[in-house]
Image: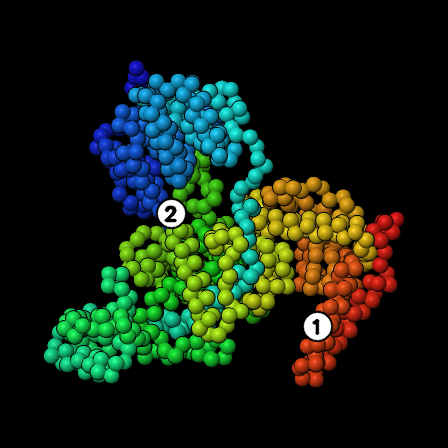
Amino acid sequence: MTTALAIEADPYILPLPEPDGPVVMDRWISLGNSHPNSCYSDDIWSLGPLTDKPGDSIHKINLGKCPAILRSEVRRVMWVLINGELRPTYIRERGFQNRTRDGVLTMRDNILQWLKFARWLGRQGVSQLSDCTMEHWKAYAAKIASSGCGRGHALTILRWLSDLWAFDQLSVSPCGITRPPWEDEGVDDYLPAVTGEAGGENKTEPLDPTVIGPLLTWSIRLVEDFSGDILAAWAERRRMHARVAATPSTRGGLAAVKNYLQPLVDSGAPLPATVSRKHGITLAHHYVAAVTGASWNQVHDFATRRGLRMLAALQPGPSPMQVPVTGRIEGRPWREFMDYEETPILVQHLATAAAIVIMYLTGMRPQEAQSLRSGCCPDPEPNPDGSTPRHLIRSRHYKNVRDSDGHHVSAGEERAVPWVAITPVVNAIRVLERLVPDGELLFSSAHHDIVAQRKQHGALKRSSLGRRVEKLVSWINQEATAQGLPAQHVPEDPHGNLGLSRLRRTLAWHIARRPGGLVALAIQYGHMRTALDARTSTGYGSRERRGFHGELDVETALAAAQTAARLRDATAAGEKISGPAARRAIVGATSMPSFEGALTTPKAAAKFLARDGLVLFDNPDAFLICAFKRDTALCEPDPGATAPNQFACQLGCGNAIRTDSHARAAREHADRLDAKADNVPQPLGNRLRRTADRFRALADAHDSAAQTAEEAVA
């Protein structure tokens, strides 16, 4: 039996907890965490005391899902996992785990696997953990390997099962579970075969261009064109609602209700209606009370006596407010009036649109956006020369944040270098700041639960934001139809739901592959790569921090590799090539290293892009391929840049090459410009014809200088 002296000599050994003791020891609860602590004897344990990230839910562990015969022992090891630390010497020996203590989400997932294992042991007739034999371990590992899960996930499960044994060793009274065989024999033989599949952010599919285009357009439209009307309507609605709550019942109020509603009933006009969870479509009691000056009870009593609830469902009408409409769409007002009942829904859509603008146009992870607070993006002081610096966003990040002891920090830490905010992002933040109090989370659950008005902690959860995006898309499509703009519908994405995690990869895709397209043209506030390429000053994440530039490098490298492959296939099929960099481009295309699956890591992508002069970038807007060599580029790339400023492509650059396909595309574009010139005023038409002539001249120059790939490298 372990003595008190031994416990004192070994700080990693934990004593047995008292039945009424806390689940989480005080040492692990951060200052400011007010989530209630469960008792050790409870069958439901809250992990709230370990949760400080605003966007995380409060997870709970249900010990009732553990077989009763094993529950006491599993409870003990769970408590040690929550409050203990693995010995550093043990961590070094294992090699595959580099921390002594995990974060709350990993703890939760770990415990859930233990409960599954305990239920399996119970079905095998095991009544105490010490009866778990090597055969049991091997049989369960085989079950995992044959379950269809990937090799990486299977490895994680086996690591968690090893923790059951490892943390048991840290109890003053261990259960005596045996050491899993893979701890001694190595884990490879217990895992499913390698499939070659990769995971993580860099395998996330970007949103289809036909989806992100109208989604971003409508989001910016809501923030910049409609937000003034929506927020004014929201303020007026709250004022009206508060007035109803403070209005007593009077004779004059009852008369006002009758004078307002009875003429509508007599004439068969629509009645102001709302949608109730309990009653469906019904009379808008609050609205009627507000416009008549009556109490809610008087409206309810009158409506009940006259059967107006059913009548409103048959003849539902609007609830207009006296709020001027200033927003325009296609040059006309976007609403005839602001509606009392529609306003909460519009506020919710406005907040969702702001979230999309912020996350898409910065490259933030959802958890970073969830931690933003009012005041995070102050207006900068003008420079001495009168110019205005860019807005900076102070935010927190969470990925791999650990304290000096290597423990996960649930609250994250402030980014060492802030994000840079272009104008649409600043506007989105300003909208959100009008919805929450000073210093509050911009996506505070308590202030964004506009419709249900539930009191929730922290920020809106990712699942909730995801559902709101889907609702916003439905609203956009209805609005596009109502406004006569069918071309601005958001279609279904080929890869499924529009998850917020896909926005980050989509931004990288558009910067890398559409340099003159969606981001640059839909925003008109400056090119995104310009803002993003100043890596040191902007703080969009260094390669070492695996920030946004990791995603950008991966997408850029994949695009360049595909350009090289297309050039190689085209020249092999007989297409000719021209341009000062023709020889270098052919060498780059034919000497491209094998990259199947390899370029999905930032490190591999950065190495690929560092091959100065051999990396190929397609520029369909300029009808050429750039064999980017930094020292000879005329697009003024930054020092150390590994990609051209494709939006600033210059004629006569020594990095340019063209193929027969580029020449054909240039002529086709020239024909389209000529056709357009015939239908516009003469000055503009003449300008279009001169541009068309310039593109035909480029194609003619290619035809006169074109040579085969073999001739180019000779």
Q: Position of residue 331 (x, y in %)?
A: 50, 79
At label 2, counting other C-alpha atoms closer than 10 Å, the crowd grade (few under 14, some 14-19, many 20 or more) is many
Q: Position of residue 156 (x, y in %)?
A: 47, 33
Residue at x-position 30% and y-position 53%? 456
Looking at the image, residue 428 sits to the left or right of residue 274; the answer is right
Residue 638 vs residue 328, the one in the foreground = 328
At label 1, counting other C-alpha atoms closer than 10 Å, the crowd grade (few under 14, some 14-19, many 20 or more) is some
Looking at the image, residue 545 sits to the left or right of residue 559; the answer is left
Give the SS element for disc 1: helix
Contact, mark 1 vs mark 2 (Cβ under 8 Å): no
Residue 76 seen anywhere in this rendered image of the structure: no
Q: Position of residue 517 (x, y in %)?
A: 61, 63
Color theme of the render: rainbow
Residue 517 seen anywhere in this rendered image of the structure: yes
> Which image quarter is the N terminus in?
top left
Q: Earlier in the sequence, mark 1 or mark 2?
A: 2
Task: Measure how far apart labels 1 and 2 are at the Cα level.
Answer: 53 Å
Residue at x-position 85% and y-position 49%? 710
Q: Which residue is tagged 2?
A: 56
Looking at the image, residue 496 sits to the left or right of residue 600; the answer is left
Residue type highlighted by circle 1: Arg
**In this view, 156 is above or below 649:** above
Dividing the picture into quarters, in which one does residue 434 lie?
Answer: bottom left
Residue at x-position 29% and y-position 36%? 62
Q: How many marks?
A: 2
Residue 672 — which label?
A: 1
Residue at x-position 44% and y-position 54%? 369
Residue 629 — which label?
A: none
Residue 151 vs residue 431, the one in the foreground = 151
Residue type highlighted by circle 2: Asp
Residue furthest left as drawn? 251
**In this view, 662 is above or below 311:** above
